[in-house]
Image (cartoon, helix red, strand yellow):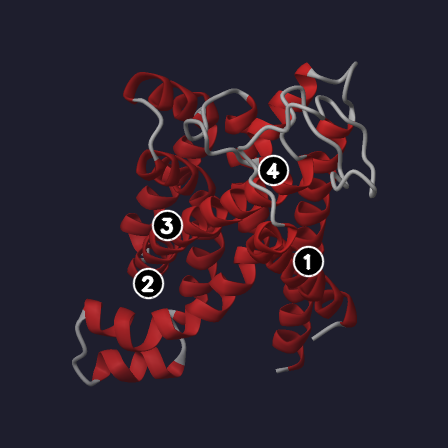
């Protein structure tokens, strides 16, 4: 594995550990205001290292709690995208012929739709819930994964072990379960390094628009929305959540690029 990918993996692990364990170590309630420190600037002596917002809530505690929510929603939505994209791509690639062409055309149609606007409309009409948010984000990011998996499944369709299974009388679903999906899963997992930051970014965008989970839950997106309202009086309430979000997205992006290049090199060497 490339050193850059290992470094990004370490950064992601540290960020995740900080978001999950940080609120316990800081010992501050992200939802409890400190009425004596309204819009206080970052200070080590006051105990508010990242400062406070307009009603005295600690920015560090809120940033870490928001990161925990954003990472959790992003990971769960990515799992939804993995199930849909892996299954759809495997079926399309192995079926071949007119079925494959029809399924690829459907992907083209879905890609052309203003899917993000549809997601916003669904959340606005049916209310903000965790399950709807996961389905909406997972349904938005699975298309690229399905394309990659379909191409690899089409290549494996003529592989000797697949031809041997078909000659032995294996059914369509048996070939998928026993031969194609186990060989496609590593590629899909590597590609998740590119899908996960996209899911986190979509969730943050929806949170910024006010379409995330209801209060008191707050993700990085909703924190950015709150910080933008206080940019003149407390710019740190925007800068710190934005910094954590950018660092997380960049680490995932570089990790995905490094793993993809590593996989390509191994495939070429083989």
Q: Count the marks: how many?
A: 4
Looking at the image, residue 224 sits to the left or right of residue 80; the answer is right
- The residue carrying mark 2 is 94
Q: Disc 4 versus disc 3: distance between alpha carbons? A: 27 Å
- Please determine whether, in this image, residue 265 is positioned above or below residue 149: below
Q: Earlier in the sequence, mark 1 or mark 3?
A: 3
Secondary element type, mark 2: helix
x, y (%) of residue 180?
35, 71
Q: Earlier in the sequence, mark 4 or mark 2?
A: 4
Q: Which mark is residue 62?
A: 4
Q: Earlier in the sequence, mark 4 or mark 3?
A: 4
- Please determine whether, in this image, residue 85 is positioned above or below residue 241: below
From the viewer's perspective, is the residue at label 3 or at label 2 nearer? Answer: 3
Looking at the image, residue 25 sits to the left or right of residue 217; the answer is right
Q: Which mark is residue 80?
A: 3
Looking at the image, residue 165 sits to the left or right of residue 146; the answer is left
- The residue carrying mark 1 is 257
Q: Which mark is residue 87?
A: none
Q: Disc 2 versus disc 1: distance between alpha carbons? A: 27 Å
From the viewer's perspective, is the residue at label 2 or at label 1 nearer? Answer: 1
Residue occupying image coordinates x 17% and y 72%: 171
Residues at badges 4 and 1 in contact (C-beta under 8 Å)?
no
Residue occupying image coordinates x 41% and y 77%: 159
From the viewer's perspective, is the residue at label 1 or at label 3 nearer? Answer: 3
- Please determine whether, in this image, residue 44 is positioned above or below residue 151: above
Location of residue 238 (image quadrant): top right
Secondary element type, mark 3: helix
x, y (%) of residue 10?
70, 66
Residues at badges 2 and 1 in contact (C-beta under 8 Å)?
no
x, y (%) of residue 204?
56, 33
Q: Earlier in the sequence, mark 3 or mark 2?
A: 3
Q: Disc 1 versus disc 3: distance between alpha carbons? A: 22 Å
């Amino acid at each position: 594995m490339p050193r850059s990918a290992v470094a990004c993996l370490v950064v992601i692990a540290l960020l995740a550990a900080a978001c999950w364990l940080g609120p316990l170590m800081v010992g501050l309630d992200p939802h409890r205001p400190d009425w004596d420190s309204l819009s206080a600037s970052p200070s080590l002596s006051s105990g508010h290292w990242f400062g406070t917002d307009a009603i005295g809530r600690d920015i560090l505690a809120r940033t870490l709690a928001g990161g925990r929510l954003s990472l959790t929603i992003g990971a769960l939505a990515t799992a939804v995208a993995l199930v849909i994209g892996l299954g759809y791509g495997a079926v399309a690639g192995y079926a071949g012929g007119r079925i494959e062409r029809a399924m690829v055309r459907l992907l083209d149609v879905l890609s052309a739709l203003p899917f993000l606007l549809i997601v916003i409309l669904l959340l606005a009409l049916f209310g903000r819930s965790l399950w709807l948010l996961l389905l909406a984000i997972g349904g938005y990011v699975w298309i690229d994964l399905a394309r990659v998996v379909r191409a690899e499944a089409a290549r494996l369709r003529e592989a000797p072990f697949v031809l041997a299974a078909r000659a032995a009388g294996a059914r369509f679903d048996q070939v998928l379960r026993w031969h194609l999906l186990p060989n496609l899963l590593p590629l899909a997992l590597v590609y998740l390094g590119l899908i996960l930051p996209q899911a986190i970014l979509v969730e943050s965008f929806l949170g910024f628009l006010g379409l995330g989970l209801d209060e008191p839950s707050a993700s990085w997106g909703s924190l950015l929305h709150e910080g933008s309202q206080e940019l003149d009086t407390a710019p740190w309430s925007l800068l710190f959540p934005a910094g954590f979000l950018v660092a997380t997205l960049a680490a995932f992006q570089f990790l995905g690029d490094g793993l993809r290049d590593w996989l390509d090199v191994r495939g070429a060497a083989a």
